[in-house]
């Protein structure tokens, strides 16, 4: 009798572990940026300053989006102490000012949040003031209806 109970307990335990493993995989896959971590990463170097821009690959209209900008110098070192902001424009439809200011996170990383108010093609001009010098890099994003 104890053999049957032990075998049934092993089966239940195995099913429970399989369910927990599946839940963990799904949970980890959903972490990060909207869209399951599917990021749009673009990079430009302007006068020796490299801008790496990250945002959700397909942001939705009226959904708050987090932007991440990493600034690095010619040696690949993070540039700290910069003043960074984004200028979000839709070339096909001129609108009011949409210019979120980025917060410094350390190590040359800056984050800002913004909302796209219309679907379509957008340009995001990232402005950085470093040691009295002004730099700007332009990135693109395609916004979809929810």
Image: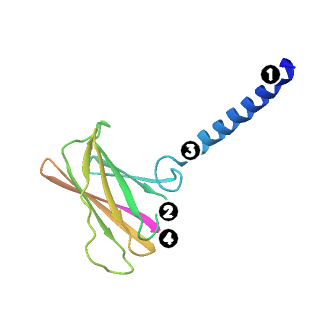
Along the line of sight, the residue nearer the viewer: 144 or 91: 144
**Lower position in the chain sequence, tag 1 or tag 2:** 1
Along the line of sight, the residue nearer the viewer: 22 or 86: 22
- Mark 3 is surrounded, within 10 Å at the Cα level, by few (under 14), some (14 to 19) or many (20 or more) other residues, namely few
Residue located farthest toward the bottom when viewing the structure as drawn: 93
| Residue at image location 38% in from the left, 69% down from the top | 116
Q: Which mark is residue 27?
A: 3
Dot 2 and dot 3 residues touching (CB under 8 Å): no
Q: Which mark is residue 58?
A: 2
**Lower position in the chain sequence, tag 4 or tag 1:** 1
Residue at mark 4 to residue at mark 2: CA–CA distance: 7 Å
Q: Is residue 72 above or below residue 85?
A: above
**Lower position in the chain sequence, tag 2 or tag 3:** 3
Whole-percent x, y for residue 105 in the image:
27, 43
Q: Which residue is mark 1?
A: 6
Residue 144 lies within the magenta run: yes
**Lower position in the chain sequence, tag 3 or tag 1:** 1
Please give the range of residues in magenta.
138-146
């Amino acid at each position: 009798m104890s053999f049957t109970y032990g075998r049934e307990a092993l089966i239940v335990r195995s099913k429970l572990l399989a369910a927990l493993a599946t839940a963990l995989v799904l949970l980890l896959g959903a972490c990060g940026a909207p869209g399951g971590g599917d990021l749009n990463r673009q990079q430009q170097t302007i006068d020796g300053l490299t801008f790496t821009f990250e945002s959700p690959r397909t942001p939705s209209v009226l959904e708050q989006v987090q932007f991440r900008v990493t600034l690095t110098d010619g040696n690949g070192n993070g540039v700290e102490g910069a003043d960074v902001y984004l200028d979000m424009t839709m070339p096909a439809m001129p609108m009011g000012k949409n210019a979120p200011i980025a917060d410094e996170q350390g190590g040359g990383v800056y984050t800002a949040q913004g909302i796209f108010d219309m679907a379509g093609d957008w340009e995001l001009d990232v402005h950085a003031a470093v040691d009295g010098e002004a730099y700007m890099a332009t990135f693109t994003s395609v916004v979809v209806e929810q």
